[in-house]
Amino acid sequence: MDLAQSSVEEWLDSHPDDMQDYFLRHADVTLVNKWLVAHGFNQLPDFPAPIRNSSLTNLRYTYSFSNESSNPSSPVDTRCNDSGFFDSSRHQRSNSKKHLRHDYARSKKRNIFRTYEPNGGESTLESRRNSLKEMRQFRSLPPTSVNLLSMLIQSKVRLPRYPSKDIDHKRELKETNEKEFFLEIVKDISNELDLKSLSAKIVANVSCMLDADKVSLYLIEGKAAGKQVLVSKIFDLHAGTSIFPSCTGDIRVPWGQGIIGHVAETGETVNLKDAMKDPRYNDELGKITGYQTETLLCMPIRNADNEIVGVAQALNNNKEEGFTQEDEKMLATYLTFCGIGIHNAQIFDAYSKEYDRNRALLEVVHDLFTEQTSVDHVVLKIMQRAQSLLKCERCSLLLKDKESNSENAFDKIFDLAYPMKNGHSGNSDRDSSLRVTSKIAELVLLTGETINITDASQDPRIEHEDETVKGIRTRSVLCKPVRNRHFQIIGVAQVINRIDGLPFDDHDDLLFEAFAIFCGLGINNCQLYEQVSLAAARQAVALEVLSYHASVPQEEVLKLKEKKLPDIQELKIMEFTFNDFSLDNDQMMQASVIMFNDLGLSKKFRIEYETLCRWLLTVRKNYRNVAYHNWRHAFNVCQVMFTILKHCQCKNYLTDNETLALTVACLCHDLDHRGTNNAFQQKSSSALSQLYGTSATLEHHHFNHAIMILNSGGTNLFGNLGSEDFSEVTKLLKQAILATDLSLHIQLRSKFFAMVDSGQKVFDDRESKEIVRSVMMTTCDIAAITKPWEVQRKVSELVITEFFDQGDKEKHELNIQPQACMDRDRQDEIAKLQLAWIDGICLPLYKSLVQLDSAFQPMLDGLLDNRSRWERLDAERLSKHAILETGV
Ligand SMILES: Nc1nc2c(ncn2[C@@H]2O[C@@H]3COP(=O)(O)O[C@H]3[C@H]2O)c(=O)[nH]1
Ligand SMILES: [Zn+2]
């Protein structure tokens, strides 16, 4: 066991990268804390209270949990009071010096950063293997959009990692072949794009080159924002600056401080034989660690544009004369290469950050599309992503109270704390950290302006009394309005305290702006979705109510079912001269049953008698009580179809499915007609035109209504049809009902006329059959014009009554002038209009039908008779008119 342990340790020692990788992936905050305690870093700056009465008072620390392994969803408690680790007792503080000294002594013994790869190219192989493993991992997952997106936005860029030569090898080379040595250390850094590794390599190489005991490297950050600071990426304790390492290895030196600051600011090289005597030298750390600095060489690093990008400092080369001119020259030359390398690595770093940002925003977009059902879900997801990207202690969203009279009241608050509290929504009163910043949120809600408070202790708008009670300290706040798609403010998004202790910068502002927009969009989508769901539910309820009223009581069904059917001859329904008004309601029902039976439909399609009765009664009930487009019209249309099927040739070309579809279509073709035509639906922007569009608006509705009836309980006439027949009959039914749109007939009829003119008598191809069926529907629909004069006169009155009602609506409700045939003020022109109707639509149709099949002759005869009647009436009107005008 012990042996295994020692071999494990040995392996870990020889594989520092793997060990570090394992640590980064598996270490939790407790372990990090333990590590920090063990290494003497037992104070956190500003968390929770500044250090007072200590010899370290003027030391500036910056602790950051912001390295790539930090994840806001991990339960990191930055206050760490539970463990007592950050307890600010004096005892702990005085111990810290001891730890620090101890650690420093140890750090001298070994390289903290290994600057070479003991096993050559293995790491490149390993990274390739890892990336393959990741791909396999994604590929093995089921293909959900999340997995596909993850795969797509996986960075395919792998950092080149070139192994450094052993430090001893470099030293040897330096002794034997200085030129080779120099080439080696330039090559060493030329391909390194990771800033941290690059810094470590430069430090190691400069140390070797100058025989310096300690080398440090600082890079300038925050130049663009005008807040310059010198940052060291590597963990490297040394004396000479008032700095302290952070737990990520980032060390920050304020601008202009110490020799490093001076060199960065002026660009001068500083070469000292006795650094401690220089007034710029600040030896706070030296006092603690006991490290004595003697010789010092500090030089600026410039990029290709000659701008200073950093500073390198070497200490103690243990030579009496200090660092020589030769050393200076060599360092200057080497730093020229380092400057280019650093510049490239910084650009790469900026691109990586941008990549991360875009990736996070893409993920938010994905969330937005997948989470549309609940505001809570979408907001929480976006906030989690915002918090993970902005790395802040708290992220909240406060939604405006729409009901409240007050302009700055919130009714829903989402709050995500760090460590993750699994965001909750509710009353903010219980939460003091929200209360201290709610004034800011109210202000943002009122003004619509972003507020970025970089130092909350100096801001009067933050109520600090609450903080002392709860032990929470607001250091910085970034607060933004959240708007809907109409740019109205619907809430406020707020982030508090960056984890690294720095204030929110312009970059954060921009990023948070994107999140606020996403939040607004997400909420908007969810609200729309909720509205649609609500409307759908409302519609479902309305349909339920309607279908209850549209259905027929069972007694009525039984009554019809049990009533003896009269003789078909008695009803005279097999004649073209059938009187549309001869049957009463019950007789029309019975006549319909007889037609189904006589055509053999009931038998062929195994339609149960009770189902047929219920269906017929239901269809009748679903016609409105309008003047013309009512149940009687539907019945009369069906009667004509029946007569045609009984007397004309076309029956021979129709299949049973077609006969069934045409019969059902006649009875259903005007279902739920409201007494107004398609043009009116369009002009009034009725719900029907919105639902079905402007082409065959009503006809689509009639068809859908027919399907609805067929689908409701006990009325499925097609219930015993096989699936193929069922879908064919439904399709034929749709075609037939849509064909009753007169404008479609006008488009189609020329084809029919051409077919008849060409002498075609047999219709067995798909297209001509469809044309014939459509023409048959119109033939029946307008057949009242062919009926005996008394019937025609009565029907035309009903048609005109409905027309005039629509005309009245157009005049009074839509404020438009109706067509002549719908204008009540022109009722004396009826005969003229009927003549136009006959000549324009009816006569060409019935003439062509007779040409096709002489069995249609009675229809044409009736039509011509009615024409002469209308002609006479029109002539009478004209002569009356002439008498009135001339007085003769
Ligand atoms: N002018 C006129 N139009 C008619 C007459 N009979 C039917 N129609 C029209 O023919 C149309 C056929 O389709 P619709 O049932 O939608 O509406 C009908 C009426 O607009 C009529 O006697 N005179
Ligand atoms: Zn009709």
Image (cartoon, rainbow, N blue to C red):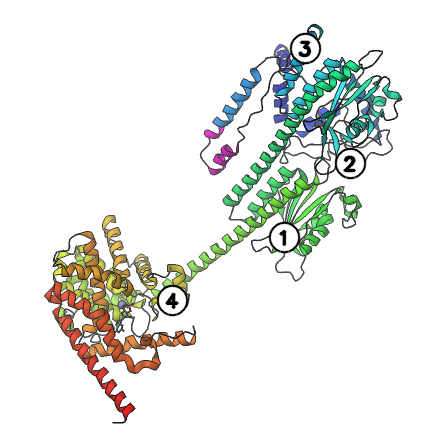
Disc 1 + disc 4, Cβ < 8 Å: no
In the image, residue 505 lies in the stretch drawn in magenta: no
Label located before the other in sequence (2 or 3): 2
Q: Image point 68% across, 19% down: which residue?
A: 201
Magenta highlight range: 136-158
Distance between the alpha carbons at the discs numbered 1 and 4? 41 Å
Any atom of ligand 1 within 8 Å of the CB at mark 1? no
| Mark before the other along the chain sequence, 1 or 3 | 3
- Say the numbered circle drawn on residue 46: 2
Tell whether position 151 is magenta: yes
Q: CA distance from mark 2 to mark 3?
A: 49 Å
Query: How far is mark 2 from mark 1, CA to CA?
Result: 31 Å
What residue would you read off at disc 4? 681
- Identify residue type, mark 4: Gln
Q: CA distance from mark 1 to mark 3?
A: 66 Å
Whether residue 562 can be seen here? no
Quadrant (top left, top right, bottom left, bottom right) of the C terminus: bottom left
Q: Nearer the viewer, residue 153 or 574?
A: 153
Specify whether 230 is left or right of 445.
right
Q: Which residue is mark 1?
A: 491
Position of 832 relative to 497 (above/below): below
Residue 179, numbered circle: 3
**N-term mark: 4 or 2:** 2
Which quadrant of the figure shows ligand 1? Answer: bottom left
Q: Quadrant of residue 645?
A: bottom left
Dot placed on the residue nearer the N-terminal end, 2 or 1: 2
Whole-percent x, y for residue 160 in the image = 58, 22
